[in-house]
Amino acid sequence: MIFRSVTLPIFVRYGEDILPHLREILEAENLTFKRASMITGHLGEHLIEELGLVRHFQEAEVLNLRKRDDGLSELKSHILGSRSELIISLGGGSINDIGKYISMESSIPLLTIPTTLSNDGLISPISILNLDGERRSLGTTIPIGVVADLKVLRESPKMLLLSGVGELISNLSAGLDWELALKRGLEKVDHMAKEMAFNAAYKLLVKAQSYEGIRDKGLIEDLLNGLILSGLAMIMAGSSRPASGAEHNISHAIDRSFRRYRTLHGLQVGFSTLFTLLLHGEEELLSRVIYLYKRLGFPTSFEELGLRREVFLEAVLLAPKLRDRYTILNEHKVTEELIDEVYAG
Ligand SMILES: [Zn+2]
């Protein structure tokens, strides 16, 4: 029999105040680890102390990466030398990206404890890392599990959560681009993966009215699950296609050529999604996304994002040249007037 096989995390557990029960959560999955290395930042270190997370293991060391100035290979050697059986990444996207990379390089399993939800890298097999002074996207391993404390996530900085919303919503535009490439006979579409990522984003639109702002309990849960589903979709598809289309290309163009205007990844892709939905002629979808954004306080104008219209136009023109991925930008002559249809007023 022929099947596709993919590697998935063993478990995802989330709930209110669940971090103090870390050991029980692992034991419920038949997982026991004596020695653990916890990689984290300043806030994470504080959380580890406050919740006494070290006591869940016979031996555990806390590695605050903001205090250490060694590189990734020194960090890997240190963790291998400590004979840790588990790496825990406790923090935001960049800490998790480092965790996934070190886990792959050392063959030590990784447990992810997110402290915010700013992007879809939670379980995706990709890390964005600074290597040799260059920002690079690398294929990495995935965590064995995710333990997410909804209370910790809800209390994380508002802009990071908004970034997570933009990242998830960008799946709408990415899915439409993928379908477009299929229609033009240029690519195959993995419909299971596409639907999984698209519907995870669409759920936020369906429930928009019920959200009482960016820290709404239901929203945080939907955002967490949505970003995990995006990761699963990317694992299934074996590429970032289900969650990355023209809107990501525009964001890459800003990162690369207009660094002065760079902001959080999810804000850039979520903002650009408004424009790519217009190009796709998806006006109803567009107005529902704008409704969601306004309800949550997500930027919908250049002023709110801190970007200039001229810079955005240049980024849009540059975007299709950056990556060999067919999108709606390959089919439109973009003008300032078109941009104004979405972002003016
Ligand atoms: Zn992204």
Image: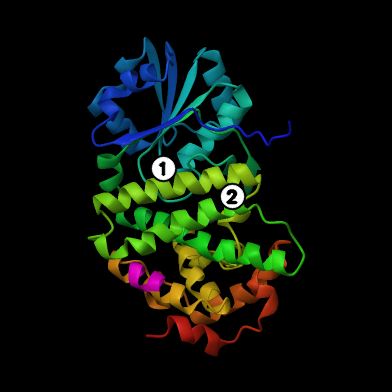
Inspect the image, locate mark 2, and give the three-letter code of the amino acid beneath it: Met
Q: Is residue 289 magenta?
A: yes
Residue identified by numbered label 1? 92
Residue 207 percent location from the top left of the image: 32, 60
Quadrant containing the N terminus in the rendered view: top right
Asked which secondary structure carries label 2, the reply is helix
Tell me, yes or no, if residue 131 can be seen here: no
Compared with 124, 188 (above or below) is: below
Using the rendered view, name the quadrant where residue 2 is placed.
top right
Q: Disc 1 to disc 2, how far (Cα)?
A: 28 Å
Q: Is residue 169 magenta?
A: no
Span shown in magenta: 288-293
Q: Residue at x 57, y 78 (%)?
A: 279
Residue identified by numbered label 2? 192
Quadrant containing the C terminus in the rendered view: bottom left
Using the rendered view, name the quadrant where residue 73 is placed.
top right
Q: Earlier in the sequence, mark 1 or mark 2?
A: 1
Tell me, yes or no, if residue 289 can be seen here: yes
Which circle, 1 or 2, is nearer the viewer?
A: 2
Inspect the image, locate mark 1, and give the three-letter code of the amino acid beneath it: Gly
Q: Along the line of sight, which residue is nearer the eye, 292 or 34?
A: 292
